[in-house]
Image (cartoon, rainbow, N blue to C red):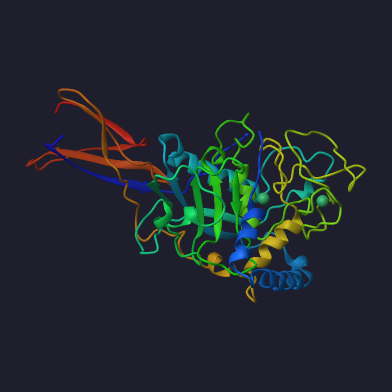
Amino acid sequence: MKNLILTLVCLFAAVTLRAQSAHEFKCATTENLEKQKDADPGLESRMLLYEEQVQQWISENSNKLNKAGTTITIPVVVHIVYKTAAQNISNQRVFDQIDSTNKAFAGQIEHSMGAFSSGLQANCNIQFCLAKKTPDGQATNGIERRQTTVDSFDVGGAVKWDISGGMDPWDPTKYLNIWVCNTYSYFSGYANYPGGGIGQEFGSIVRYGAFGPTDPTYYRGNGGTLTHELGHNLNLRHIWGDDGTSCDGTDYCDDTPNQAGYTRGVPTGVVTDNCSASSPGIMYMNFMDYSDDIVGANYTPDQATRMQANFASSNGVLLSLANSDACSAPSSCEIPTALKVISKSSRGAELGWTAMYGATGYNFRYRKVGASSWTSSTLTSNSKSIGGL
Ligand code: ZN
Ligand code: CA
């Protein structure tokens, strides 16, 4: 290997959406919000003010939405903070997660809507891209990693800063930051609401085991946790209104039925409760409920409108994300990284490198040190066996 010089260039193209398919889910967004309020006494009043602005915007604009309008694309960066190898999830799982979430936000998840109209499965006209450009303008696949000594992270900001064993956020006005880590065992993920203003810690946190489509039989095995948390980032509330099991709470959406508490497991058909006692019942398949991923099917048109309100040119707090150029690569092509020897023999070796998001192939070449001619090939996988060394 010491005798070889290698260069790698990847071929760049869009990747098509990939089909994806999924015991107890618990979101700690409310607990995190209480912690934020303790640290920021003005937060609650700012959130209430923003809620008024959102309601006003919706009343003036809802009839213009969810037509085949412009799709908002939000750049995301995934910070993988791991202690064990199992927590260091693969790039492919991240790619599959983003594809799954994009299908969800496009209204393309093929799960039953029960007795509800298919019209309640909205195309939100919101998509997410893994960042192709770092805050410094360098090429990236939108994923960065750090090994930590921290066993697990609670709600709050610890995972969001290098100094506390996590990873610093990228500019939250240009990137939606997502952290994947081992969380305290009582929750699967949490997110910040946008209403109080976009601080450095704005983003979503997902437990590593619930990130990415992994196992359809696993309660969070369909990538639904990130889809749910991003809903909070875009100002959605839990569908039961976070009022325990009473019928007084609201998620501020008229087309989601009033619902007592959250739903568990894999319900089917019509499910009713005290707040929605007759068919079509409660919308247990909504991404803002707690049903298993294999049930999760929709955001409603009103939820979509509520999310889009964050991008209003007048006062949308997330408008800068929609205008960010971080989904565009800095120049021609991202360069694969982490070239390594997977195995070697006396005169051969298998080489591998980091799979790049969006790459359809890799140009690969090598030569003996001092030689002028290269041996070249074009590959579709991110490994290559060479012989005759
Ligand atoms: Zn939640
Ligand atoms: Ca309720």
Looking at the picture, how far across and down is residue 64, in whole percent?
A: 74, 67
Quarter of the image containing the N terminus?
A: top left
Q: Is residue 131 left or right of residue 345?
A: right
Of residues 275 and 367, the one drawn nearer to the viewer in this rendering: 275
Q: Is residue 294 left or right of residue 274?
A: left
Quadrant for residue 281, please give it.
Answer: top right
Q: Residue at x 63, y 61 (%)?
A: 193
Quarter of the image containing the C terminus?
A: top left
Q: Is residue 162 left or right of residue 368?
A: right
Q: Is residue 77 visible?
A: no
Of residues 40 and 229, the one drawn nearer to the viewer in this rendering: 40
Looking at the picture, how far across and down is residue 178, in whole percent?
A: 51, 53
The relative height of residue 299 versus residue 199 in the rendered view (above or below) is above
Q: Residue at x 56, y 53 (%)?
A: 204
Q: Residue furthest left?
A: 370
Q: Is residue 300 visible?
A: yes
Quadrant for residue 311, please give it.
Answer: bottom right
Q: Residue furthest top?
A: 346
Of residues 190 and 39, the one drawn nearer to the viewer in this rendering: 39
Looking at the picture, how far across and down is residue 333, in whole percent?
A: 35, 53
Looking at the picture, how far across and down is residue 222, in whole percent?
A: 61, 37
Q: Is residue 170 left or right of residue 27?
A: left
Q: Residue furthest right?
A: 278
